[in-house]
Image (cartoon, helix red, strand yellow):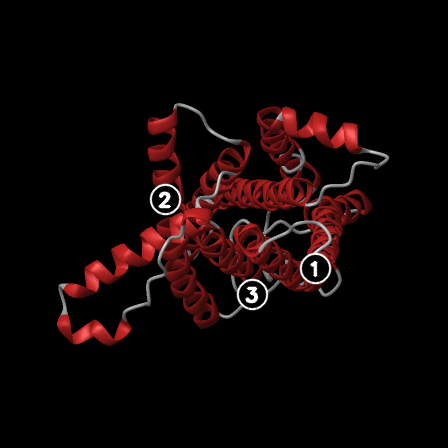
Amino acid sequence: MMLTDKLVIWLATGLLAICTIFFNMYLLLVIQRSYRKTHKLNPCDFIISAIAVASITLQILTYLWQTIDEIDILCLTNYVDAILVVLIFSVKLIVFWSTAFLIFYYGIKLVVEPVHCYTRIQEAILKHVHIVVALIYICGFANCVPLLIILGHKNFTSDIADCGTIMPTTTIGYTYIFYYILISDIMPCIMMVKSSISIMYHLAKHLQNMKASTNGAHGPKLGTQMRVIKMTLSLVVMFVIFVVGDMLTQATVVLLRLNTLYLIVLIASIYTTVSAAAMVYGKKSHWKELVASYNLFLDEYPCLSSLKVAEVKTEPHDNEND
């Protein structure tokens, strides 16, 4: 990539990093405050906390690598850059699998199917959420660390130095890249899409039963679920878009021998920013408090009063217990 393109992406990533860290830190602070009050952490909050920590780490590593790449024109720290790239790929995998697990969790929670071939397996997974998240973290690093050994980490792309470039040079290297795309993009995408289809089917059936008044469903109950449903479906849509973009950029690396790593990390940064905002919106109490704080901040500057966001009143049935 041209140096000017890298500079523009570096600046864009910096702005996205600020937004990502803000939203995820907000989630962590709200969850931590709730934990101090109740002295317990429900599975949903634990998974979101894991995603928030991984997203913040991803943005810090990404911006650190890009900054070193901008400064170190001669690639004197080439091996350090390669290590940072591997860590970025590892944490990226953790973010996406943790998000897929969150969608899976909400899918099981919202969709009640008493007769199901793997109901017991699902229940077992939900009972051991902490272990599953720990395994996601371990597998994220275990699957990416071999990149340093299997792939080359020198500049083979152009006359412009691309420090820390990880390019496949052997059959094993190409095979590993395809394996990484499979486990980091395709498999979590399949899990998300399957869960979202179940949620949409459940919602359609729920609305149909509500209209026919056959199951005693009522507006408030559906209203408490709709926000979570909107959040999960938006996360799935965003992830599918990301997968398409990520696979295209990975293909340019493998097939065209072009270094598009800057684009890969930019797409990941956009995803972590938008997904963090979606998770804040997904819980009404979080969103209401954030909007109130935002409007309170604008009260200090009357000239910005037009930027205020309308606040939604909390009703008794809006108290979510995830």
Secondary structure of the residue carrying tag 1 is helix
Name the side, left or right, on which 131 lies relative to 55: right
Q: Is residue 209 above or below residue 79?
A: below
- The residue where tag 3 is placed is 159
Q: Quadrant of residue 130?
A: top right
Tag nearer the camera, 3 or 2 = 2
Quadrant where the N terminus lies?
bottom right
Tag nearer the camera, 3 or 1 = 1
Give residue 234's position: percent from left, percent from top: 59, 60
- The residue where tag 1 is placed is 247
Task: In the rendered structure, find residue 25 and report the number of the disc placed on it.
Answer: 2
**Disc 2 vs disc 1: Cβ atoms closer than 8 Å?**
no
Name the side, left or right, on which 121 lies relative to 223: right
Give residue 237's position: percent from left, percent from top: 64, 61
Cα–Cα gap, marks 3 and 1: 25 Å
Residue type, mark 1 in image: Met
Residue type, mark 2 in image: Met
The crowding category of the residue bearing disc 2, from other C-alpha atoms within 10 Å (few below 14, some 14 to 19, many at least 20), is some
